């Protein structure tokens, strides 16, 4: 039975394990995404857009569990790389729509290799990675919400 002191040990904290794992995962993706010209957060934006585009900035922010103010600089960088476009919705001038450019759409073909490279890097197959993702339970919900 753990003592109260044991419960306060850093190594026993689930929050520390998750934060450390997240940092390690990003470091695994870094060299894989570099040839695509993407950072890990930019890759997540592109994944969401490859699933469904165009999208409003608000929809995209919700999907990625980010505040629109945090997402805007990512979108601007992707736009400067020629991967996405931003324009106002003709139906509602307040709504900023994010769409893929032809270059952004084409990048998806190159990105198809990313999951295989990640699996090779961590030594897990798709089934074991899916089990790991699912084991995170409420922490791994779509948009980071339980």
Image (spheres, grey):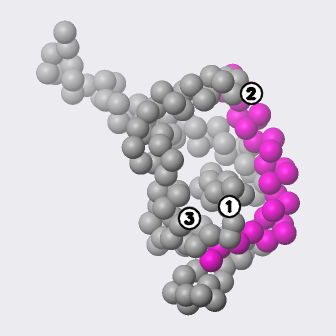
Q: Name the residue that disc number 2 marks.
A: 120
Q: Name the residue that disc number 3 marks.
A: 60
Of residue 72 and residue 29, the one placed in the foreground of this image is 72
Segment colored magenta: 97-123
Left or right of residue 65: residue 51: right
Circle on res. 38 = none
Left or right of residue 127: residue 135: left
Q: Quick one: label 3, few (<14), some, or many (20+) residues within 10 Å?
A: many
* Residue 18 point in image, percent of width and height: 43, 35
- Considering the image in quadrants, where does the C terminus appear? top left
Answer with mark 3 or mark 2, whichever residue precedes in sequence. Answer: 3
| Residue 19 visible in the current orientation | no
* Residue 129 point in image, percent of width and height: 62, 28
Secondary structure that dominates the magenta span = helix
Of residue 20 and residue 104, the one placed in the foreground of this image is 104
Q: Residue at x 79, y 71 (%)?
A: 101
Left or right of residue 62: residue 16: left
Answer with mark 1 or mark 2, whichever residue precedes in sequence. Answer: 1
| Total count of labels | 3
Residue 8 picture quarter: top left
- Which type of secondary structure does the marked residue at label 2 adopt? helix
């Amino acid at each position: 039975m753990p003592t109260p002191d044991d419960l306060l040990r850093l190594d026993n904290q689930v929050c520390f394990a998750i934060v450390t794992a997240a940092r390690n995962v990003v470091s695994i993706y870094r060299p894989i995404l570099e040839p695509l010209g993407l950072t890990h957060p930019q890759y997540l934006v592109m994944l969401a857009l490859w699933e469904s585009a165009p999208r409003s900035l608000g929809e995209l922010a919700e999907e990625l569990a980010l505040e629109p103010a945090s997402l805007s600089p990512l979108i601007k960088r992707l736009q400067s790389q020629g991967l996405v476009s931003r324009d106002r919705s003709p139906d509602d001038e307040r709504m900023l729509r994010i769409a893929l450019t032809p270059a952004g759409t084409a990048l998806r073909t190159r990105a198809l290799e990313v999951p295989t490279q990640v699996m090779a890097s961590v030594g897990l197959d798709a089934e074991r990675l899916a089990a790991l993702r699912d084991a995170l339970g409420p922490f791994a919900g779509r948009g980071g919400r339980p």
